[in-house]
Structures are given as structure tokens and as C-alpha cells.
Image (cartoon, helix red, strand yellow):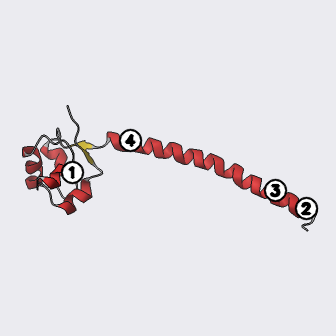
Amino acid sequence: MWPMFMRWTLRVGLGSVLLLALPLFTLAVTVSSAGQMAEQSDLLDINTATAEQLKVLPGIGDAYSEKIIKGRPYQRKDELVQKKILPRATYEGIKYKIVAKQK
């Protein structure tokens, strides 16, 4: 059997841990949601981006930016690989930075 002061310490200790964890969980969810919204607004639309905007993407130079523009419009961003406009490795490096919006 635990002495009385140890039982009280365990109860307070567990309660303190739970009370400390709850605000952190809420903060993490809020920051994550805000980060996702910011990331979505920073996505580059491959259907409307200029050659200069496309060249900012890693692995995209003059040749690939021109191929992307000539292959428009895109229904989905993975068509860059399907239509053999970009190699898979290059696409994997930019797929989270681009979107193919429809008009």
C-alpha cells in the first residue's frame, strides 16, 4: 500500500501532466491548420505560371519550363510525368509545390 502523501503526489502529478498536455495539443492543431492553409496559397499553378515562375522550382530550368508551358492545359499535376514532360525524380522534388487548377 502506498503512503498517503505518495498517493496524493501521484494524483497531482498525473493531473498536472494532463493539464499541461492539453494546451500543447490544441496549439499544435492550430499551427498545423494555419501552416496547411499557408502552404496551399503558396502552390504554383502549372497552368498559369510564367516561365520565370516555373524556373524557381528545384530542377526546373529553361527547357523544362518551356515543355511545361507547351503541354498545357493539365487536368492533374501528375500529367507532367505521364506526358513525359518531366522525369519522375524531378516531379517528386516539386509535387508538393505545384497544383493544376481548372478554370
Task: Tell me the CA gap for discs 4 and 2.
Answer: 50 Å
The tag on residue 38 is: 4
On the image, the x and y values in percent for residue 49 come to 17, 41
Q: Amino acid at mark 4?
A: Ala
Whole-Å distance between the Cαs marked 1 and 3? 54 Å
Give the distance between the C-alpha atoms of the residues marked 1 and 4, in whole angstroms. 22 Å
Quarter of the picture containing the C terminus is top left
Q: Nearer the viewer, mark 3 or mark 4?
A: 3
Image point (25%, 59%), residue name: 92
Mark 1 residue element: loop
Label at residue 5: 2
Q: Quadrant of residue 41?
A: top left
Q: Position of residue 60 (x, y in %)?
A: 16, 55
- Of circles 4 and 2, the one toward us is 2
Q: Who's the residue at 12% across and 50% down the image?
A: 65
Q: Which residue is the site of mark 1?
A: 78
The numbered mark at residue 11 is 3
Disc 2 marks a residue whose amino acid type is Phe
Which type of secondary structure does the marked residue at label 2 adopt?
Answer: helix
- Dot 4 falls on a residue whose secondary structure is helix
Q: Nearer the viewer, mark 1 or mark 2?
A: 1
Asked if the residue under mark 4 is in contact with the one under mark 1, i.e. CB atoms within 8 Å, the reply is no
Extreme residue in the bottom direction = 1
Q: Note whether 31 is above or below 5 in the view shown.
A: above
Mark toward the start of the polypeptide (2 vs 3) = 2
Distance from the alpha carbon under mark 3 to that under mark 4: 41 Å
Q: Please indicate whether residue 21 sits to the left or right of residue 69 in the image.
A: right
Q: Is residue 18 above or below residue 43?
A: below
Q: Are marks 3 and 4 in contact (CB under 8 Å)?
A: no
Of mark 4 and mark 2, the one earlier in the sequence is: 2
